[in-house]
Image (spheres, rainbow, N blue to C red):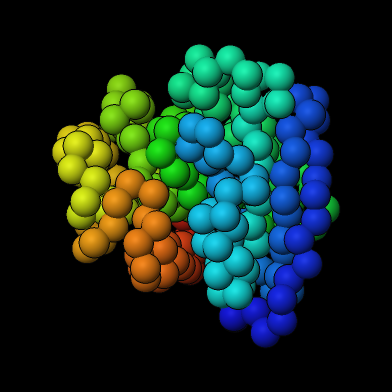
Amino acid sequence: MPATAMTEVEEVRIEPDGLIGLLGVPHGAHGIVIFAHGSGSGRLSPRNNHVAAALRQAGLATLLVDLLTSIEERDRRNVFDIDLLASRLALATHWAAAEARTRRLVPLYFGASTGAAAALVAASRPDAGIAAVVSRGGRPDLAMDTLPAVRAPTLLLVGSLDGPVIGMNERALAELKGEKQLIIIDGAGHLFEEPGTMDEVVRHATRWFLEHLARPQRPRQ
């Protein structure tokens, strides 16, 4: 059910790596969307917070988490270390599964830019149990070798003005073996800063998450 009041968001710390996150759990939530940010971004990203606020209004819990510590962010190589980012996303997912407020919530992933690759790598793990993945302006091509193992239904959202990334997503779509969809949002660039384009992201992401949250999860083959 859609949330009728603004959900309080609080800062949390995820150990043992000391990751900092922002957690919001609306009353009656059944799923939690865990965000994997792109390079140079984090839990305070205005675009991802815009999406997260809308998802909470739709009745989904959200966890926006910095996948790197402040010291690690100083080394740009870490920003593109997809395996490291995926391991941190898995850590955040395990934290949510153990945390009293979120342990009964089904995990979902929302990834942007390089974070989309990390989300897909984390979702490809046999024990991941991720109900659905949404990628915004993502680089799923950076996870190409693991895409055939992803069974979570995956939605790829790309701006029509983001030429090279469209091709990257088309190639990634061909490698995904589970339920999948590519939507090109008219008039959007890589960051979806154009008027109305982020609202389209919200609309498609909310639909995708709620549709697949309502379906029973199939066991991995």
At x 61%, y 40%, the residue is 42
Q: Residue furthest bottom?
A: 4
Location of residue 149 by image quarter: top left
Q: Is residue 110 visible?
A: yes
Q: Is residue 193 left or right of residue 4?
A: left
Q: Is residue 107 left or right of residue 193?
A: right
Quadrant of the snapshot with the N terminus: bottom right
Residue 198 lies, in percent from the top left, at 41, 63
Residue 81 lies, in percent from the top left, at 49, 19
Question: Which residue is at the front of the view, 49 or 127?
Answer: 49
Question: Which residue is at the front of the view, 128 or 199?
Answer: 199
Quadrant of the snapshot with the C terminus: top left
Q: Is residue 30 visible?
A: no
Q: Height in image: 78 above or below 124?
A: above
Report how many numbered discs are placed on residues in the image.
0
At x 28%, y 57%, the residue is 188
At x 75%, y 38%, the residue is 20
At x 55%, y 62%, the residue is 50
Question: Which residue is at the front of the view, 201 or 102?
Answer: 201
Q: Residue furthest front?
A: 194
Location of residue 23 by image quarter: bottom right
Residue 178 lies, in percent from the top left, at 29, 45
Q: Height in image: 1 above or below 125?
A: below
Residue 170 lies, in percent from the top left, at 18, 41
Q: Is residue 77 left or right of residue 71?
A: left
Question: Which residue is at the front of the view, 68 or 210?
Answer: 68
Q: Is residue 101 left or right of residue 60?
A: right
